[in-house]
Image (tube, grey):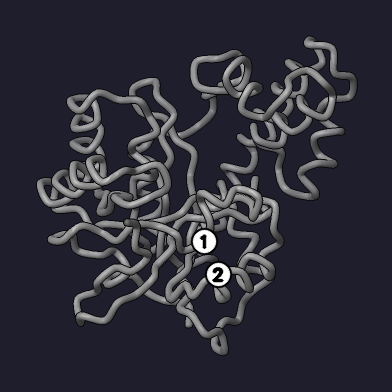
């Protein structure tokens, strides 16, 4: 049975969700609504980790009166050995992260323009502007383009759009322009935060390749590994826990929440960290 509690160093149980998204990237809820949902779900420690932006925090700070602890967060798009890898930053100074947000935003817009052109070649007229409407002010990402593909009738579901056009190894999987993983780790460090490898089980790597990734990540100064997340069964969690202990990495947990309609990855509904893993939330600076 999945529990949503994790031990901290003091023996008190906490429900930490350090990976989720608002409509400032590819989630559906505005920041204040996501925050309200997290409180209703009895989340104790929350980090909003929108893709390559910290804009959500503009809507919810200051946080002194919140009934949960808030941690600054971001999910940076990077590449390593030709593979798209996401690095979560936690507990950094938001102002110090601004140059990184600006740089990543430029790359995201360049990618959005290429994806818009790709969909126009597939027969969807005015694809970029239509996707911008779907994104509602956020920089359009692949999930927004997938939603356009469905509404335009190109694919039946968003999953089909990723499987056939936008997913890893497909024409819409545009990696050019993303920084190397090591650079992203340095940006997070320079802003006073902790770098965490996000959802390592999603990259489809062999165990040996994942270990090479972690070798380079630790060499660059990375300090955390997302051990418990949506889609990690007990066997995967135990293996990731072993890796965290082996590499001296702090353990993180997060739902990767995007929408209330996706109840399988709802806020705070994540398995506990396995025994022996040092929780990353014991080492971050809170915003309140």
Residue that lies at the very extreme toward the bottom in this rendered image: 65
In which image quadrant can residue 191 be found?
bottom left
Tell me the residue at 22%/38% (across/down): 214
Q: Is residue 281 left or right of residue 37?
A: left
Q: Is residue 256 left or right of residue 152?
A: left
Q: Which residue is mark 1?
A: 267
Residue that lies at the very extreme toward the left in this rendered image: 246
Q: Are marks 2 and 1 in contact (CB under 8 Å)?
A: yes
The reply to whether residue 99 is in sight is no
Which is nearer the N-term, disc 2 or disc 1? Answer: 2
Q: CA distance from mark 2 to mark 1?
A: 6 Å
Name the secondary structure under disc 1. loop
Name the secondary structure under disc 2. helix
> Percent from the top left, x then y, of residue 286?
42, 76
Up/down of 272 relative to 178, above or below: below
Tell me the residue at 47%/72% (across/down): 43
Res 38 label: 2
């Amino acid at each position: 049975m999945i529990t949503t509690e994790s031990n901290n160093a003091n023996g008190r149980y906490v429900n930490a969700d350090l990976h989720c998204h608002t409509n400032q990237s590819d989630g559906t809820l505005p920041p204040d609504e996501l925050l309200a949902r997290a409180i209703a779900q009895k989340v104790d420690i929350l980090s909003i980790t929108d893709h390559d932006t910290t804009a959500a925090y503009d809507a919810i700070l200051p946080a002194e009166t919140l009934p949960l602890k808030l941690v600054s967060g971001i999910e940076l798009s990077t590449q390593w050995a030709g593979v798209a890898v996401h690095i979560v930053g936690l507990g950094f100074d938001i102002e110090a992260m601004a140059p990184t947000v600006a740089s990543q935003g430029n790359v995201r817009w360049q990618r959005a323009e290429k994806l818009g052109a790709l969909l126009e070649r597939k027969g969807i007229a005015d694809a970029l502007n239509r996707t911008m409407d779907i994104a509602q002010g956020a920089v359009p990402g692949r999930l927004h383009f997938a939603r356009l593909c469905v509404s335009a009738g190109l694919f039946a579901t968003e999953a089909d759009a990723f499987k056939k056009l936008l997913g890893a190894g497909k024409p819409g999987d545009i990696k050019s322009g993303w920084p190397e993983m090591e650079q992203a780790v340095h940006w997070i460090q320079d802003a006073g935060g902790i770098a965490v490898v996000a959802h390592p089980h999603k990259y489809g790597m062999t165990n040996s390749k994942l270990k090479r990734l972690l070798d380079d990540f630790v060499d660059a100064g990375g300090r955390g590994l997302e051990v418990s997340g949506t889609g990690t069964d007990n066997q995967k969690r135990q293996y990731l826990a072993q890796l965290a202990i082996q590499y001296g990495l702090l353990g993180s947990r997060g739902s990767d929440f995007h929408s209330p309609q996706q109840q399988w990855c709802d806020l705070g509904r994540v398995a506990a960290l396995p025994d022996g893993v040092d929780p990353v939330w014991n080492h971050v600076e809170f915003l309140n």
